[in-house]
Amino acid sequence: FSPKSLFFSPPGKRLPPSVFLLPPPPEELAGSRPTLSLTCLVRGFFPEAVDVQWQKNQENIPESSGNSGNSGAQTG
């Protein structure tokens, strides 16, 4: 039994994602910057393709509105 097998899904079996919203780091909260960083962690899903959209008041926030969009997105 290997730990990696915990995250393996048989071919064709769909698994819904687990989604976690992580708060800004304490040093950002203590600072005086007008913006904060949020991290959205999406894991445990299959197939390994995902589309994540940030929303405000249930409306998608376009990447061109001054936010960093998905510049930190990583999959794997």
Image (cartoon, rainbow, N blue to C red):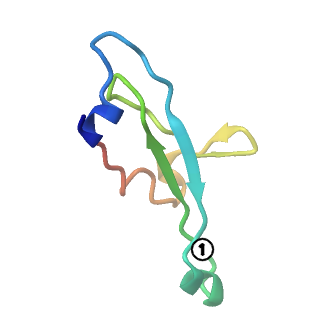
SS category of the residue bearing label 1: loop
> Compared with residue 36, is residue 65 higher up or lower down, i.e. above or below?
above
Please indicate whether residue 28 sits to the left or right of residue 43 in the image.
right
Kindly give the residue lying farthest to the bottom in the view shown: 31
Q: Amino acid at mark 1?
A: Thr
> Compared with residue 21, is residue 34 higher up or lower down, i.e. above or below?
below
Nearer to the camera, 46 or 71: 46
Kindly give the residue lying farthest to the top in the view shown: 12
Within 10 angstroms of label 1, few (less than 14), some, or many (20 or more) residues?
Answer: few
Task: Give the residue at x 59% y 53%.
Answer: 21
Nearer to the camera, 70 or 2: 2
The tally of labels here is 1
The residue tagged 1 is 35
Give the position of the C terminus as an image quadrant.
top left
Kindly give the residue lying farthest to the right in the view shown: 57
Nearer to the camera, 17 or 51: 17
Residue 30 image position (x, y, % from top left): 64, 89
Nearer to the camera, 33 or 1: 1
For residue 29, what is the image quadrant? Answer: bottom right
Residue 19 image position (x, y, % from top left): 55, 42
Please indicate whether residue 70 sits to the left or right of residue 23 in the image.
left
Residue 62 image position (x, y, % from top left): 53, 45
> Compared with residue 46, is residue 30 higher up or lower down, i.e. above or below?
below
Task: Give the residue at x 59% y 46%.
Answer: 61
Give the position of the N terminus as an image quadrant.
top left
Residue 20 image position (x, y, % from top left): 57, 49
Task: Give the residue at x 26% y 39%.
Answer: 4
Task: Give the residue at x 36% y 50%.
Answer: 73
For residue 65, what is the image quadrant? Answer: bottom right
